[in-house]
Image (tube, helix red, strand yellow):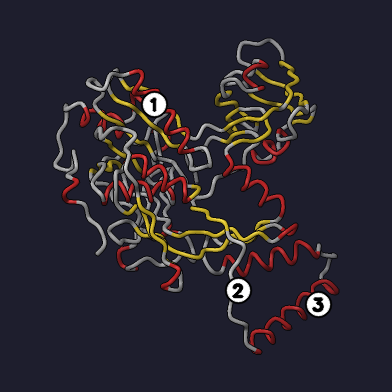
Amino acid sequence: MIRRASLVLVGALMGATAMSVIYSAGVPAEAAGSSTYKELSVFGDVFERVRAQYVTPPDDEKLVENAINGMLSSLDPHSSFMNAKDANDMRTQTKGEFGGLGIEVTMENELVKVITPIDDTPAAKAGVLAGDYISEIDGQSVRGLKLEDAVEKMRGAVNTPIKLTLIRKGADKPIELTIVRDVVAVQAVKSRVEGDNVGYLRVISFTEKTYDDLEKAIKKIKADVPADKLKGYVLDLRLNPGGLLDQAINVSDALLQRGEVVSTRGRNPDETRRFNAGPGDLTDGKPVIVLINGGSASASEIVAGALQDLRRATVLGTRSFGKGSVQTIIPLGEAGALRLTTALYYTPSGRSIQGTGITPDIKVEEPLPQELQGKMVTEGESSLRGHIKGQSETDEGSGSVAYVPPDPKDDVQLNYALDLLRGKKTDPAFPPNPDKAVVAK
């Protein structure tokens, strides 16, 4: 099974999960009945039997942690227990900055390959280059390590040194660098001007920095391109696994003047919450095309769904992942935290995308290069074992290929969007008519 490798930021949490997150101190539940406590006594008996008689002495802490995770994983794929380290990693990721080196890496030929050093970070200043292979970390070989283990070794406290051994094409011997870790801010939004008349905004993930980064990016594009020349914006949410719910709401609000962005509904009717946009469109009403694919999940689906239902933007690409649930993070003191699914979210029209995903207004497939054909697995929420069923089980079938070409010139979906904005292509779905917004009654 081959999937497109996601970029990993050294010092950040590995593998951002496709979820929206809110924080809670916990909600008291109705007391369990006597039969429940009887079952818990059975668990206690099994636990003691395992401790006393298993062929090798088990780790008590791991036994309990795995038992908790077994209970939570039986609920849905997104509920889980996080030990203290995992909880801290999650907080690091959502904060959007960390202590580290500042390089985006992947694994290739059993070595850590540098995809790119982030500008103005310790790695860039020390001379690490894109394409370098890290063969040793503090004198220890990386061969045989998983990528996450290698990343863990490169994490560390600010102002602490680390020695990397690099293999560089063209160099006659390995290069040794000693780098001092520093605070690295993860860029949540990348932007550029396409040609000389379209603003391109790629939202990588929804961290605490996303709205601020988006606002700065739009301001820069508006400063670089005169208003009468700017044709519009492409908001690229492909391969965006989600993140913080409030940031998804803020990003949507940045492009809307009014209307409901999203609602969340829990097990009790009085737990329903609605979030609305206020006046002020950062793009000054310029046309917007949103790009999505099978890698667009959770918070990115909230944004795409809001802009689509309110007819603020045209959504282009392929069907999104289909994760329409909200996880509440419940702190458990020094033990860690509980990540529990507590609600489903609904787009302004009242539709749940759980298990179905966002269907684009204009479907444009991204061709796979020959070397990936037949090797990439199409996954969506509906294919996850134990996922929460959507509004209609028969309508399920979320997800699509999650691939974006590394070179924009080869990006069929992006270039289709650019042609629409520049008037080289036409489609009934573009531009959308805000008078035909679809909202729940």
Image coordinates of residue 305 in percent, x first then y, are: 32, 50
Q: Nearest to the eye among marks 2 and 3: give it.
A: 2
Asked which secondary structure carries label 3, the reply is helix
- Looking at the image, residue 421 sits to the left or right of residue 256; the answer is left
Picture quarter containing residue 351? bottom left
Image coordinates of residue 435 in percent, x first then y, are: 16, 48
Q: How far apart are marks 2 and 3 (CA)?
A: 32 Å
- Looking at the rendered structure, the kind of residue marked 1 is Lys
Picture quarter containing residue 290? top left
Q: Residues within 10 Å of mark 1 (few under 14, many from 20)?
A: few
- Looking at the image, residue 98 sits to the left or right of residue 264; the answer is right
Image coordinates of residue 275 in percent, x first then y, are: 39, 55
Image coordinates of residue 62 in percent, x first then y, are: 75, 61
- Looking at the rendered structure, the kind of residue marked 2 is Pro
Farthest residue, direction front: 279
Residue marked by disc 1: 219
Picture quarter containing residue 367? top left
- Looking at the rendered structure, the kind of residue marked 3 is Arg
Residue drawn 47% across the image and 49% down it: 246
Residue marked by disc 2: 28
Residue marked by disc 3: 49
Q: Nearer the viewer, residue 95 or 241?
A: 95
**Disc ID at residue 4:** none
